[in-house]
Image (spheres, coloured by chain):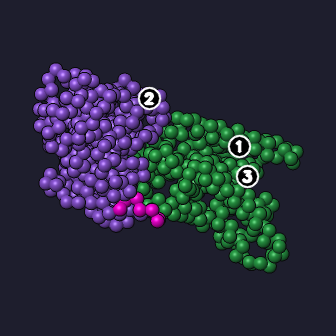
Chain colours: A green, B purple
Amino acid sequence: MSPINLRTIAGKELRDRMRNHWVLAIALVFTAFSLIIAYFGGAQQGTIGFRSLEFTITSLVSLVIYLIPLIGLLLGFDAIVAERERGSLDLLLTLPLTPLDLLLGKYLGLAAALALSTLLGFALVAGLLYIQFGNAALFHFGGFMLSALLLGMAFLSIAMLISVIARDRTRASGMAVAAWFAFVLVFDLLLLGVMVAGEGRWGGGALAYLLLLNPADVFRILNLFSAEQAAATYGLTQLLPPALARTPVMGAVMAAWIILPLMIASWRFKR
Amino acid sequence: MAASPTEAAAPAIELRGVRKHFGALCAVDGIDLRVRAGEILGLIGRNGAGKSTLFKLMLGLEQPTEGEVHVAGVRVGSPRFRDTRRRIGYLPENIALYDNLSGLETLRFFARLKGTPLHQCDTRLAEAGLSEAASRPVREYSKGMRQRLGLAQALLGSPRLLFFDEPTNGLDPQAIRDFYRRIHALRDGGATIVISSHILAELQQRVDRLAIIADGRLRASGSVAELRSRTAMPVVFALELAPGDIAAAAASLAGIENLGVTVTDRGLDLACPAAQRATVLEAVLRLGPRLRNLQINEPSLEDMFFGLER
C-alpha cells in the first residue's frame, strides 16, 4: 500500500465531488432537513423550537437513519464498477498501484466528501444548539455527528463491496437500493415480526444481538440517552442487554461494519 | 515456432506456452512469442482472435491459465512486477479519461501514480500539441485530442515498454504520421513497442515485425518481407497496352518460367514469384513504347494476413 497512491486517488475523488457540487448539495439538504426537523420536531406535541438537546438529537436520529445510509450507498455503489464499465480500470491497474490502493484511495476520498457534507450540513444546528444550551450541547451533538459519520462510512463500505461484486452499474444500483431497503426498512420489521410471532419465546436474548447485524441499529443504540428513552422511541433497541449498550462496544461494532465489507471487497477485487 | 536470429537476444517480452481459459472458452491457446528489446511488434488478428487477452496477459491484467509471461525479465504477476509497471506505458483502445479533469490535471494524476516528476507533464502536453488546451476540461476535447492526451499519458515516465491498442483510432492522417514518427523515435531510443491494430495497411510499413493471431494461436510472426516470402504470394505486374498490342506482348513474355499471364480489359496481368520480379521487369521494359503504363503490386499485408491466418 502506497500513501502517495492513496492520497492521489482520494484527492481526485474528493475534488470530483467538490467540483460537481455534490458536497455542497448534500450539505444544503442536511442543513435544511436538520433545521426543519430540529425546530418543528415537536409540532405534533403542540410545541415548536429547540425543546431540549435530547429531543433534538432523537429527532435528528430518524433523519440520519434514512438519509445517511442512502447517501453512503449512492456515493459508492459505482466507484469501481463504473471504472470497469468505461474501460479506465484496466489503465489504472497497469500503473504501479495495487488493487487495495485503488479501493482504499477511492473509499477515503468518498468518505472525506461524505464527512465534509455531513459536518457542514449539521454545523448550523450545532451552532444554534450551542447558543441555546451551551458547551454540553456541543459535546453531545458532536458525538451524534461522529456516530452519523461512522454510519455513513459503514454504508459507504457496503457500497464499495457492491461496486466490486456487481457486473455493471445497473446491477450495482439495484443492489444498493436493495441494501438500503434491507437495512433501513426490512431488517427491524423482520425482527419485530419474529418477536411478535413467537410471543417473545423464540430466540431469547439472542434476538437482541441480531441488532448488531444492522449498522443502522448500531447507530440508534449509540445515540440512546437512557433506557427509558429507548423504550419510548426506538422499539427494538430496548431489547439490548445493558452490557452491550456501551459506547466503546458499539463504536467497535460500527468500526467492524466499516472494515469488514472493505476487506471482503479487497479480497474480491484482487481476484 | 522457432525463433529467428534477431529474436535470440534477451527478449523484452517473452511468452512461453501461454494459455488462457475463460471457463470453457480458450482465448489464448499455447502461444510462444519473444519480442526483442528495441523493436516494434505489430499484433494483428480479427476481432475475438485473442489479441486483447494477449495484451492483458502481457500487462498483468490477466493471469495465464498455463505458461509464463515475462516482461523486462520479470515474471508478470510476481511481486517484483509492480515496480516493472513504472517502465510500462499503455494506451488502451478508446481510452476513457476523466471528463471533469483538465488535460494537465489528467497527466498529473497519472504522473503521481507512476511516480513521475510532475514537470514532465508540461513537456508531454507540448509534445502532444495540447499546451493551449492544458487547462480545458477533457470533456471539451475532440476524439483526436483525447487520443493524443492518452498517448502523452502512456509516455509519462519515459517507459521502456509501450503497449498501444488501436492507437490511431480517431487520429487524422497528419496525426497518424506524427504518431508513427514519434514511436519510431522511441524505438530508436531503445524502447520496445507492441501495437495492436486492425488497420493492416498502416502497420505494413511501420513495424519491424508482425505477429498474426487467429483463434488464440500465433499463426505466424516475422518481418513483412519474411511473411511475404513465407506466404509465397505472387507479385503482380499490371500492364496497360493498346488493344492491338496485347497478343504480341503476351507472346513475347511466354518464355518466362513461372509466369502467370492473364488478359485484362486494359492489357495484361503478370503474376510471378517475388524472387523473379527483376527478370519479369526486364522483359516488360523490352516492350518499349507499346507499354502505356505499368503498376507493380506486391502482396499487401491484408493478402498475407488472409493467407497466413488460415
**Three-letter code, disc 1:** Ser
Q: Are marks 1 and 2 on the same chain?
A: no
The residue drawn where x is 42% and y is 48% is B47
* A146 lies left or right of B191: right
Q: Chain of mark 1?
A: A
The one nearer the camera, A107 or A254, is A107
- Tell me the number on the disc at residue B63: none
- For disc 2, the marked residue is B142
What is the C-alpha distance between the residues marked 2 and 3? 48 Å
Which residue is painted at 43% across and 40% down in the image? B94
Q: Which contiguous range is marked in magenta?
A: B22-29
Residue toward you, A225 or B10: B10
Q: Position of residue B279 (x, y in %)?
A: 12, 37
Report x, y in % for residue A244: 65, 70
Q: Which mark is residue A62?
A: 3
Where residue B91 sits, quadrant-wise, is: top left
> B24 or A140, which lies in front?
B24
